[in-house]
Amino acid sequence: MNVFLVALPSGFVLIDCGMETAPAFEALRAAMAERQIEWRDIRQIVLTHMHPDHMGMAARLLKLTGAELAMHQAEADHLRLVTSGNRRIPWLQEAYIQSGVPLSLETKMEEHFSTIRESFHPLDPGRLFAGGEKLETALGPLEVVWTSGHSPGHICLYSRERKLLFSGDQILENITPNIAWHPGRDMLAEFLDSLAALALLDIDLILPSHGEPFSGHRAWISETVGHHQERCDEILNLLVESSRTAHQMVGEMWRRELSPINHHFAIFEVLAHLEHLKRQGKVRHRSENGALEWHV
């Protein structure tokens, strides 16, 4: 997990916070000490989104730094929803039931998520973005680019002068970010629209949240759009053969045993693709004992 410190006219902005673990905290503390940067030098913390590896240490770092917290309005709303009850997405169990997930596997997935959920904390941002805002930094202005898809309020930060993009999880060199289903939304369409907007920008260097900096965002975008089209085609080919639940499709599309947490991600990614195809009129579903069986 990469976090970034960028100099401001006075002090620094920290982009993302990392997981709430002792090794992550020590890595950040040591890196700052090496550069003779004090906690109070951090004047603002910007979260690209609220997933645990990005916001985990936020509450701790806000106390140490006294910094202003900034994130997108949609992401703050989503975090408030997740932290308002038992730190479990309200529609999670219903999604498992409709996907046809066996109870024994659902229990294992819940066990794996119990530790991760400890990283979700209620936060009170002092600044909420809508997209289009500019942060004045030593790199020149950093523009807030709203890139919904991986998460409702995911943002990237773009330096038009330096042609740099702090891409969060929107663009990752060696993997495609997980696109999870949300009720009432076509998250895959939102992700693809966000990629189309980024393709219009001149970017020489991508600074991602995972992996090394790299270049070639337009080639990456083209490949990723093709990947999701292949996923949609794969789903359609399966449903031409016979109707299936989302859980059944995971077993046939990944063709290997997934860990419980990765099975969860796969379920929600299949659901996102099914939602996308449903809105295009290419698939439908019917209910069978609570589970949804999808068909063409």
Image (spheres, rainbow, N blue to C red):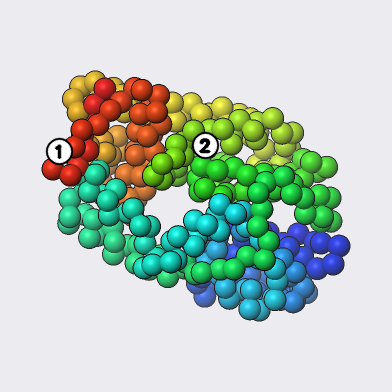
The percent position of residue 90, horizontal first and vertical second, equals 35, 57
Q: Mark 1: which secondary structure?
A: strand
Q: Could you tell me how many numbered marks the image carries?
A: 2
Say which residue appears at 49% left-offset and 62% top-offset. Answer: 80
Q: Left or right of 107: which side holds 10? A: right
Q: Left or right of 262: which side holds 27? A: right
The three-letter code of the residue at mark 2 reads Glu
Q: Left or right of 108: which side holds 117? A: right
Q: Marks 1 and 2, Cα distance to the nearest angstrom?
A: 30 Å
Specify the farthest residue to the bottom. 64
The percent position of residue 17, horizontal first and vertical second, equals 60, 64
The percent position of residue 271, horizontal first and vertical second, equals 34, 39
Name which quarter of the figure residue 2 lies in.
Answer: bottom right
The three-letter code of the residue at mark 1 reads Glu
Which residue is denoted by mark 1 in the rendering?
288
Which residue is denoted by mark 2 in the rendering?
190
Say which residue appears at 35% left-offset and 29% top-offset. Answer: 278
Q: Quadrant of the C terminus?
A: top left
Sort mark 1 into few (<14), some (14-19) or many (20+) by Cα contacts within 10 Å: few
In the depicted view, which residue is nearer to us: 46 or 80? 80
Q: Mark 2: which secondary structure?
A: helix
In the depicted view, which residue is nearer to us: 190 or 238? 190
